[in-house]
Image (tube, rainbow, N blue to C red):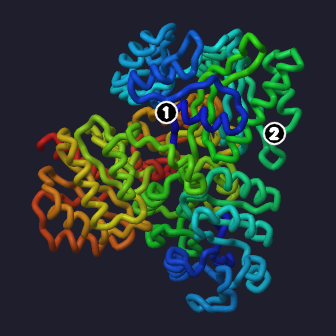
Amino acid sequence: MSILVNKDTKVIVQGFTGKEGSFHAEQCIAYGTKIVGGVTPNKGGQEHLGLPVFNTVKDAVATTGATVSMIFVPPAFVADAVMEAAAAGITLAVVITEGAPVRDMQAAKAFAVKHGMMTIGPNCPGVITAEECKIGIMPGAIFKKGHVGLISKSGTLTYEGANQVCKEGFGITTAVGIGGDPIIGLSYKQLLKMFQEDDDTHAIVMIGEIGGDLEIQAAHYIKEHITKPVVAFIAGQTAPAGKRMGHAGAIISGSAGTAKEKMDALEAAGVRVVVSPAEIGKAVKEVLSK
Amino acid sequence: MNIHEYQAKQIFAKYGVPTPRGIIANTPEEAVANAQELGGKIWVVKAQIHAGGRGLGGGVKLARSMDEVKQLASEILGMTLVTHQTGPEGKLVQKVYIEEGADIVDELYLGVVLDRAKEMPVIMASTEGGMDIETVAHNTPEKIIKIAVDPSIGFQGFHGRELVFGLGITDPQEQNKLIKFAKALYTLYMENDAEMIEINPLIKTGAGDFMALDGKMGFDDSALGRHPEIAAMRDISEEDADEREASQYGLSYISLDGEIGCMVNGAGLAMGTMDTINYMGGTPANFLDVGGSANAQTVAKGFEIILKNPKVKAIFVNIFGGIVRCDRIANGILEATKLVDVHVPVIVRLDGTNAPEAAEILRNANIPNVIAATDLADGAAKAVRAAKGE
């Protein structure tokens, strides 16, 4: 078992024929992901990487039965692409593109939720179920199959964490990079719930950052609902307090979003919090050998 | 991207948000000419920097004569203003805004910002205008009203009523004026892809009018492409020169106080690397994210920027390649050693995509000063030792 995606998941790529889309689609196919086609307007009917290209997501879904879309379109077109996927009945959109305007994502996410579509990202490395299905840009080779679920805001810390878990002799069920933009799709809370319900996942690694309060919300959720061991790292303990102009952001979130605040909240929820990402592997070993 | 008060007020005016009249000045002479043009008997000389707390820092002063305008403008122009939002180094004042004096009977606070949890903009208001609003939020949170506006319906009548009744405004004319004010502010927030608008204080005048006495605005950098007129308001003198140079090469750089230069891919791992150096008893000299498209040239540039800081005693290159290919970073390190005099030990940890090829490249090049590390902990430990001269 795993969460979100597996070896049978049918995936299309929006922005399929572009440079990034092509490169990473090829890597995903090589990893074993069941990519069944892609979408590039005005290139419908062509073939790319040996797979059919469609003009619209609707056409692609009708022909291939795809349920997941990996999105590589340029930032200005991200919202449009997400909404097109939702309207076409895609159930999970994985948005890799960085730099989508916040207002666009706000509207796109609201529309996606209305249509029952889950979103991962934007500005994220994607999702991978080890040795089955990679939808994103992560180096696939480091993700060995195992029993640890991983959720991370940061892309490279996803790799760092997974690598350590695997080097300690454990492996990954599914790893999800949720992205660090102001508006994101799936967050810690929903993913923690999925990992809790996944019998194959025995422990969860959660990697956060300074800013916002998603990690604090996650801490509350863990305290109430998560019985599996959780290891957490929050990046940015040594980051200087940012120069800023207004006060409004901090008032809305009700917290300054410091690493310490988040680490304290997680510790209070019974999470094993490490002070350096270099300790993630060892901490997983500890909690799993208890 | 942030803009100055006088620029924010130009945008306010376009949307019908009332402000006192004012004119920007670069010299004391211009300040006097502006005051004369505005007329009246009282003027406010306001330092224009991208930070709050200017009044307390001595950057906002009242003038009652032309001589005073000239004297205050000369004092404020060229001063380094230190406020609780500038950091201890402060900010150089290069422009002053000359504004007509206002007849203030009451001071409110009004702002618009994205509520990440609700995923929609929130209008914030308080009767405690003119105060440090974070202190108000902390000590008397009940005095802050928050009204979320769902962009799919926009600013409706009920939002306005919630606002005025929440602020205890009972005069129907005043209610209408403030609702119109708030609606215009919400509209300009949305239409310009603002990240934050803050008016503190928003004043009520003796005539019962509302005016933005101050204005702070920040914008979503990702949306500036569709707002060329706002992008043109960027004041690069407000930005750190090294940070700006770095950004031209796709690098994200922030200088810090320590001794170990860091070059890392990804903001999260970059912060995690700093945290690890700190945990092992060292001090990071900078945050540097080489981004997803690093190549030999950008890496060389990164070294150059890191080495400008004379405190740097060692450099830790920590790359976990996903999009970034390690062989490119390895070539970048070779290139950098030719272009820049890298006189400190460089500890290199390359993992992920094409890591074996990268190791091969570095091994063959055999550069003194370059020390290979096997993982994050090993690299950080070696960097800390190298910085201590061990």
Residue drawn at (13%, 57%) of the image = B369
Which of the image's four quarters has the C terminus of chain B?
Answer: top left
Q: Nearer the viewer, mark 2 or mark 1?
A: 2
Residue labelled with disc 1: A244
Q: What is the quadrant of residue A117 in the picture? A: bottom right
- In the image, taking residue B364 as reference, residue A124 lies left or right, namely right
Residue B23: in sight, yes or no?
yes
Amino acid on which disc 1 is placed = Arg
Expressed as whole percent of the image width and height from the top left, the position of residue B147 reads: 77, 32
Callout 2 secondary element: loop
Callout 1 secondary element: loop
Residue drawn at (67%, 11%) of the image = B104
Chain at numbered mark 1: A
Expressed as whole percent of the image width and height from the top left, the position of residue A257 reads: 54, 35
Q: What is the quadrant of residue A48 in the picture? A: bottom right
Chain at numbered mark 2: B
Expressed as whole percent of the image width and height from the top left, the position of residue A54 reads: 70, 84
* Nearer the observer, B389 or A89: A89
Residue labelled with disc 2: B155
Q: What is the quadrant of residue B131 in the picture? A: top right
Expressed as whole percent of the image width and height from the top left, the position of residue B285 reads: 28, 41
